[in-house]
Amino acid sequence: SPAGMVLSVLVILLLSVLYEAVKMGKAVLLRRALLALPRSLSQEALTQPQEGNSDPAQGSPLLMAFPISFHRWFWFHVGQTLFHVVQVVLGYMVMLAVMSYNAWIFLGAIVGSTLGYFM
């Protein structure tokens, strides 16, 4: 029916927009995860003792901050993984719809991807 076809095209269009939104969300999350990492993880900075200290781990601001930064980075990575799973599922759903070889569905996917990228 024509109403069913219009609804199908709109659903595919929205799925394509959502796919692009998830892709951008994943990029933003990656940027935040990289900013959560410490600036320098060089061996010298990690192993050099502070002046007057015999224990390299004691009093080192980098070593004391690293577990917190690593914890934040880990949760950003978990978020990225979830975003990736959603992106893959949406991509395969859109691909499966396009493989129906219906021109209107194909145009819905193209227009949805274009709108999603534009936004």
Image (tube, rainbow, N blue to C red):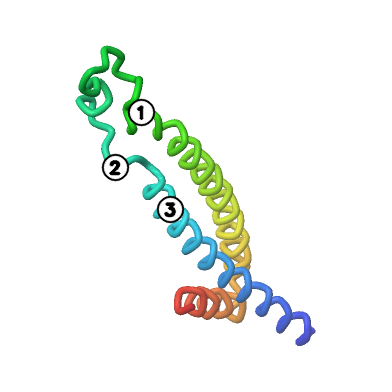
Residue shown at 76% from the left, 87% from the top: 2
Observer-side mark, 3 or 1, equals: 1
Check residue 39 in the rendering and tell me which mark sits there, or answer none: 2
Q: Quadrant of the N terminus?
A: bottom right
Mark 1 vs mark 2, CA separation in Å: 12 Å
Q: Of residues 14 and 83, which is closer to you in this image?
A: 83
Q: Residue furthest front?
A: 52
Q: Residue 64 versus residue 37: which sits nearer the camera? A: 64
Q: Amino acid at mark 2?
A: Arg
- The residue most toward the top is 54
Q: Nearer the viewer, residue 83 or 60?
A: 60
Residue 32, disc: 3
* Residue 62 position within the rendered picture, expressed as x and y whole percent measured from the top left: 33, 33
Mark nearer the N terminus (3 vs 1): 3
Specify the quadrant of the image occupied by residue 61.
Answer: top left
Counting residues from the start of the chain, the first of labels 2 and 3 encountered is 3
Question: Residue 90: x percent and y percent?
Answer: 60, 59
**How far from the left and from the top, in percent, is residue 51?**
20, 22
Q: Quick one: SS at disc 2?
A: loop
Look at the numbered disc 3 and give the secondary structure of its residue. helix
Pointer 1 residue = 63
Q: Which amino acid type is shown beneath numbered disc 1?
A: Leu
Mark 2 or 3: the one toward you: 2
For label 1, the crowd category at 10 Å Cα-Cα, with few meaning under 14, some 14 to 19 and many 20 or more, is some
Q: Amino acid at mark 3?
A: Arg
Instruction: Please tell me how crowded label 3 is: few (under 14), some (14-19), or many (20+) other residues with Cα within 10 Å.
Output: some
Residue 63, above or below 12 = above
Packing grade of label 2 (10 A; few <14, some 14-19, many >=20) is few
Residues at discs 3 and 1 in contact (Cβ within 8 Å): no
Q: Residue 57's x, y, as percent?
A: 34, 20
The Cα atoms of the two marked residues, 2 and 3, are separated by: 13 Å
